[in-house]
Image (cartoon, helix red, strand yellow):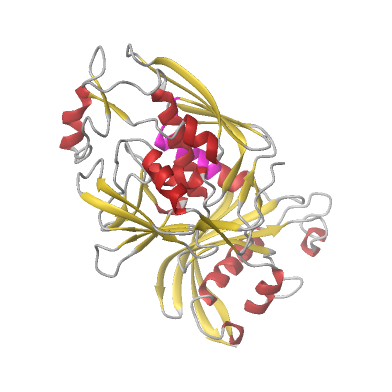
Amino acid sequence: MGAAPVGRRTIAREAVIRGVGLHRGREASARCIAGESGAGIVFRRVDLSGTPTIPARLSQVRSTDRRTALGDGEGSVETVEHLLAAAAALQIDDLLVELDGPEPPICDGSFAPYVDALRAAGTAELPGEPVVYRVTAPFHLSEGESSYVVAPAPNFRLTTTIEWSHPLIGRQAGSYDITPEGFARELGPARTFGFLDEAEALRARGLALGAGLESTLVLSEDGLVGDDALRWPDEFVRHKAGDIVGDLALMGGRVQAHVVATRPSHQGNIALARWLHRTAQRDGGVAMDIGRILDVIPHRYPMLLVDRIIEVEGTRRIVGIKNVTINEPFFQGHFPGHPIMPGVLIIEAMAQVGGMLLLGTIEDPDQKVVYFMSLDNVKFRRPVLPGDQLRCELEMLQNRGRTCRMKGVAYVDGNVVAEAEMMARVVDR
């Protein structure tokens, strides 16, 4: 296994990148400053009232159409993959990015301006452990025309293949170790590209408004538009590999795997990130251990059905783990010789994780208890057996003081086992 640094990392000094956004065509600056330990990478729209923040997390992905966009409505950011790729490759875990526009500048179309700016800012150690997602068994994933084979590896390695019926592209393939030095040397300078015959249609949809020869490799039917030369003959596949690094950064941790990607896309990359996020072995970065859980919720044996909280996104989302063993008392009667976790207890496990999220929004949580008032759209997809690890993801849909509505989904090995919408209320003990 590759050795991770003892502490989390951020930047030591601020870094500012200025320019025009690729798709919206607006002038903007990205001011990168040190982040708080455990916060991850967070964007802040300083040009909007209330300066809304958008965490760089999979739960925030809004669009993968020609770029990766996060957030909803005005409080959103687009084309974040270049900045995220640079931060992830440099193993920067926590970073605050203040934007005065809807997307970071595209600069020359490559990752290099962000790599250079962040490297010049230096790094600083933070308390806490970096999160590492380690693949323990090989798997295959397809999404549209994109295909991925992922295998265990001691570090993060990418093998990428693309294919276009264009004389400058054709079939290109490359394999790269994603280290700070390797990324800066092999992928950082690779620029984004597009096709001249698509430009009008993209602009009609409000995209590529900031694209130009200074920021994009533009391909005509038989060659490259303009006087610029390719930095490598296979610059196209190198850029696609860099995009994968940026999209996988939305997992909120470092990747330890060999990813073999064929015809990758933003849509495919995000599908891969979601699967890795749910199935890979997650090391480090525990948000709440069992001691903290016992401090917050009143449940005790045999009704405490959450062992660990591994993610908390403010008051919006929480993820908890329940390790299911044959020693669970309910297996004695459900069913003898054929142990299956009762569906009502799967829902109860989700509810307890959701209760941790709700109690985190109020004062004196140790003096409160969460009552669940209703359940809607309950579905059970497959049985939960001894030896399974139940992963409960809860999202806050509506919060009105002491009453809220949440959506819960429970997974085992990345597969949905149950889902439900629930309404709950906080009351005094």
Report which quarter residue 323 is drawn in. bottom right
Q: Residue at x 69, y 75 (%)?
A: 294
In the depicted structure, whether residue 66 falls above or below residue 318: above
Q: Residue at x 63, y 64 (%)?
A: 349
x, y percentage for residue 207? 22, 39
Q: Nearer the viewer, residue 388 or 125?
A: 125
In the depicted structure, whether residue 238 falls above or below residue 108: above
Q: Nearer the viewer, residue 28 or 254?
A: 28
Image: magenta residue range: 263-275
x, y percentage for residue 26? 20, 48
x, y percentage for residue 63? 34, 44
Q: Nearer the viewer, residue 317 or 3?
A: 3
50 relative to 158 in the view: left or right: left
Report which quarter residue 208 is drawn in. top left
Residue 415 visible in image: no
In the depicted structure, whether residue 373 falls above or below residue 35: below
Secondary structure that dominates the magenta span: helix
14 relative to 211 in the view: left or right: right
Q: Nearer the viewer, residue 276 or 50?
A: 50
Residue 405 visible in image: yes
x, y percentage for residue 311? 56, 60
Q: Is residue 264 magenta?
A: yes
